[in-house]
Amino acid sequence: MNQTFKHILFVMGVSGSGKSTIGKLLATALGYPFYDGDDYHPDHNIKKMAAGEPLNDEDRYDWLLALNELAKNHTSKGAVIACSALKESYRDLLQKGIDTKVHYIYLKGSFEEILERLQQRKDHFMPLELLQSQFEALSPPKNAIVVEIKEQPEKIVDTILIALDK
């Protein structure tokens, strides 16, 4: 990727798609800082999800604005931000004011693949029951680097780096 211009890379997908794993590896490869969007959820969002209640657009609004502000603060040095970014309207908020510097990397997997991953997780606040609601809310991006989650993380990152370099 042309390193003269620093970009904001949103690694997106439903819970369990590998956003944090891929995001950290990608950030290391590019020399960018990594931020996990989950760390920016307000307490009431985390409590709601932990109780098995899906977040609605209103719940996500302030969270998305906080991630947009984080992204804006990193346009000069670049950043990789893991965020579900399920809907086009969410992505519009995430990139508001920085459109030309934003790239989305969509980690695509089937419900079954991701359910299997989530069943193996022990340390996350997202209950399995919310996975279906995330798939229902998901509007796959039109302009994104799309990678299948079936590959090993290092191969996924190599695929992303090649796509970013074009």
Image (cartoon, helix red, strand yellow):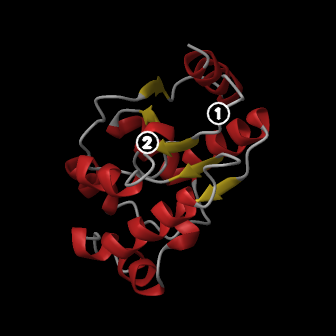
Mark 2, mark 1: which one is toward the viewer?
Answer: 1
- Name the residue type under label 2: Ile
Quadrant hosting residue 58: bottom left
Q: What label does residue 114 carry, if any?
A: 2
Residue of label 1: 5
- Name the residue type under label 1: Phe
90 on left or right of 147: left
Residue plotted at (55% across, 17% down): 163
5 on left or right of 90: right
> Is the C terminus in the top left, top right, bottom left or bottom right quadrant?
top right
Residue 24: x, y in percent? 70, 45
Circle 1 sits in a helix, a strand or a loop, which is it? loop
Distance (Cα) linking label 2 and label 1? 34 Å
Quadrant hosting residue 93: bottom left
Q: Residue furthest left?
A: 136
Circle 2 sits in a helix, a strand or a loop, which is it? helix
